[in-house]
Amino acid sequence: MTLVLYTHPRSRGRIARWMLEEVGQPYECVVLDYATTMKAPDYLAINPMGKVPALVHDGRVVTEGAAICTYLADAFPEAGLMPQDRAGFYRWMFFGAGPLEQAVVNRALGVEVPDDKRGMVGYRDLDRMADILAAELARHPHLCGAGFSAADVYVGSQIGWGLRFGTIPDRPVFADYWARISTRPAALRAAALDDALIPAG
């Protein structure tokens, strides 16, 4: 069994590494450069988009952060990262991959959706989207109830990133949630491994 993660320490590959650390299976990490190796023919054969992360598991390729987290939760059930509440899992995983991702990226890019066009974007309004997510987290310690799951790795990472860079509305429940999940041993290991790859300065 081989697991290979293609990544960069300043990318969404950090989410995939956290998920791999939660799974607890041995894996190889290949760090790519944005301008060179990510656009090289060998890597484009794996991910024609020329971006990271990408995961290769025994020759099978999985790209996109939400797909990688979902795949690993399903492939390694012994890790306990796929909850019994499948409906909640898919709901919040794809809420993260759709409305939340769009909203946070648009905020980071300074994109303002005109009021009369909000029905055309998946999140409609960033504050409304944040209120919906905050209400769910106020009801449960994790997105799918009491237990931590792959949805918390993926959506939680986006919340943490948004809080750090100011691209998600500040809600006390978000800070509490991020403090709770980001101190998990696997999260700390993954962060330390990626941080060690970032040059000083």
Image: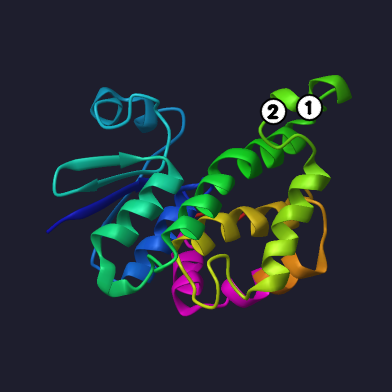
Range of the magenta residues? 178-197
Tell me which amino acid carries mark 2.
Val
- Residue at position x 26%, y 32% from top? 46
- Residue at position x 69%, y 72% from top? 139
Q: Callout 1: helix, strand or loop? A: helix
- Residue at position x 41%, y 68% from top? 83
Q: CA distance from mark 1 to mark 2?
A: 6 Å
Residue 165, given in percent of the width and then of the height, sits at 74, 51
Q: Which mark is residue 118?
A: 1
Residue 148, given in percent of the width and then of the height, sits at 49, 73
Q: Is residue 91 magenta?
A: no
Q: Which mark is residue 121?
A: 2
Tell me which amino acid carries mark 1.
Arg
Q: Callout 2: helix, strand or loop? A: loop
Q: Is residue 185 magenta?
A: yes
Q: Which mark is residue 17?
A: none
User: Dominant secondary structure of the magenta stretch?
Assistant: helix
